[in-house]
Structures are given as C-alpha cells and as structure tokens.
Image (cartoon, rainbow, N blue to C red):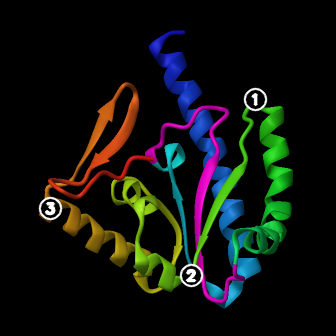
Amino acid sequence: MSEGSRAEHRNRILKAFDEVLSVLSEALLGHYGDRLVSAAVFGSVARRTPNPESDIDLLVVAHGLPVGRSRRVEEFQAVDEAVEPHLRALEERGISTRLSPVFRTPAEVQEGGPLFLDMTEHVLLLHDRGGFLQRYLDRLRAELEKTGARRLRYKGAWYWDLGPGKGDGSR
C-alpha cells in the first residue's frame, strides 16, 4: 500500500470513529442528563491510532451511579442500544468496533488509580461539565511531572515508571 493510500485509509478510519463519537456523545447526554459530569474517550481512539478492530474505551463520570459494575453496565444498556445501529453500519464498511465503558462517580475519580495515567497524555473529552475531568487530569499530570514519572515503551507496549519507590502503573 502506498503512503498516500495508507493516509487515506487512516483518515477513513478516523472519520468513522468520529461519527460514532458524535452519536455516542448525544446518547450519553440523552440518557444520563444532568447526572453526567464527564465522558472521555481514551486508548487508541484518543491517540488517533485506532485500527478497524479497536474498541472505543470510554470513561463515564456521573452522579448517582448504581453500586457494582454489572448494575452500571445494565444502566448503560440504553446508550449501547442507541449507538448499536451506527456500529452495525460501520461493520458494513469494514470497521468492527464496540464500546468498552468504565464507570466512575466524581468521588471515585478523586480517588485516582492507574486508569487515569494514560489520559494525562491522550484523551478526547466528549463532555466535561465545569471542566471537572480536565482539572483532575491537569493536577495528575503536574504531580507525575513533579515526581519524575515517565511513560515508557517496552516491546511494543506502554507502561509507567512512577519514579523511585513508587512502583509502576503498568496495565
């Protein structure tokens, strides 16, 4: 494949993902309403390097989330159903993707965790009421810089060296 063909292929994939993100954003706002604090895409889609089989890694920050992952996934079902026709249409165009949501309340975001490390480098904010998630990520980024943490590549994968005595944030 020529360089021009590769660029055209990459642009086609990015455009397809962007179309889904637009629908996803509307579905999230429609479903969660005022409870939705932030919605952010991370991973390969946020890095702008997805392939046709990449998942859409999604962080949903909302007030009043049910306790437990399975109940949160059940509540998210309406969003999944709203986006599903668009995902099927992409499949007809050779792009087989799915939503991979992670759910947090605002208090759970403040507790932190390795989930947020890569978001300090690459994140697409679909919704961020009052800049909540952006402020959190800015603070985390500053702390990582202060401690000398580094994101490193090893054998094709990324991991975090959080500095002396800090362990690492490997996935």
Name the residue beneath numbered marker 2: 105
Residue at coordinates 69% horizontally, 62% vertically from top-left?
24
Is the Cβ of the residue at disc 2 closer than 8 Å to that at disc 1?
no
Is the Cβ of the residue at disc 3 closer than 8 Å to that at disc 2?
no
> Residue type at mark 2?
Thr
Is the Cβ of the residue at disc 1 closer than 8 Å to that at disc 3?
no
Secondary structure at numbered mark 3: helix
**Which label lies toward us, 1 or 3?**
3
Find the residue positioned furthest to the front.
Answer: 165
Between the C-alphas of marks 2 and 1, the distance is 35 Å
Name the residue beneath numbered marker 3: 147
User: Is residue 34 rendered magenta in the image?
Assistant: no
Find the residue positioned furthest to the top.
Answer: 1
Quadrant holding the N terminus:
top right
> Residue type at mark 3?
Thr
Quadrant of residue 162 within the rendered picture: bottom left
Between the C-alphas of marks 1 and 3, the distance is 44 Å
Task: Tell me residue 20's x, y (percent).
Answer: 69, 53
Query: Magenta residues, as a range?
Result: 47-67
Residue at coordinates 48% horizontally, 18% vertically from top-left?
4
